[in-house]
Every structure is written in C-alpha cells, then in structure tokens.
Amino acid sequence: MKTDSSTSKVLIKINGENKFIPQNISILELLETYKINNGRVVIELNKVILKKESFQSVILNEKDEIEIVTFVGGG
C-alpha cells in the first residue's frame, strides 16, 4: 500500500484547541482553509508574532502553538 505524504497530518494547537492539519501547510494555507482574511489578522506562533510577509513561507510543524486574532470593525 502506497502512503501519500500529502495526506499525513500533524497535531498543532490553534487558539487553545488541538487540531490535526495537513503536513507541510503554511500559515497562509491554514488561513485559507479556515476562510480567514489574512489582511485583518495577527498571528502568534510559539509566542512570537509573525509579520504578514512570512505567512506564505512559515510551515507549521507538530506541536506548534498558534494564536489567530482577527479584527472586526464596527461601532
């Protein structure tokens, strides 16, 4: 039986909840998966705030902890 590495999952923590995500997924791909607008978001990965420019290049790994904070306008 052939194993497809693209279907492998890793366990990370998103906003305090354990989630399985595809292996080798970037921050940007994760945001797209959850339909989160990357223009109105702050990402903290393992206690470090990331620059938006790095969302495409940063790949999530097993046991990473990510906090996603979105901004909502209103008044």
Image (cartoon, rainbow, N blue to C red):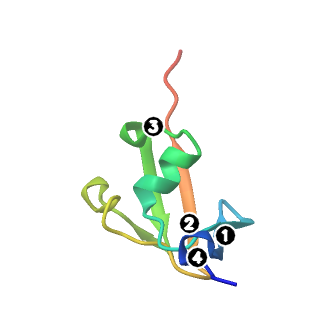
Residue reaching furthest to the front: 1
The amino acid beneath tag 3 is: Asn
Residue 63: image quadrant is bottom right
| Mark nearer the viewer, 4 or 1 | 4
Q: CA distance from mark 4 to mark 1?
A: 24 Å
Upstream in sequence: badge 3 or badge 4? 4
Q: Nearer the viewer, residue 50 or 28?
A: 28
**Does the CB distance between marks 1 and 2 fall below 8 Å?**
yes
Q: Judge left or right: residue 55 versus residue 5.
A: left
Residue reaching furthest to the top: 75
Secondary structure found at label 1: strand
Q: CA distance from mark 2 to mark 4?
A: 26 Å
Residue at numbered disc 2: 66
Q: Residue at coordinates 49% horizontally, 36% vertically from top-left?
A: 71
Q: CA distance from mark 1 to mark 2?
A: 6 Å
Secondary structure found at label 4: loop
Q: Residues within 10 Å of mark 1 (few under 14, many from 20)?
A: some
Q: Is residue 33 above or below residue 1?
A: above
Q: Residue at coordinates 48% horizontally, 66% vertically from top-left?
A: 25
Q: Residues within 10 Å of mark 4 (few under 14, many from 20)?
A: few
Residue at numbered disc 4: 4
Residue at numbered disc 3: 37
Q: Is residue 35 above or below residue 74?
A: below
Upstream in sequence: badge 3 or badge 2? 3
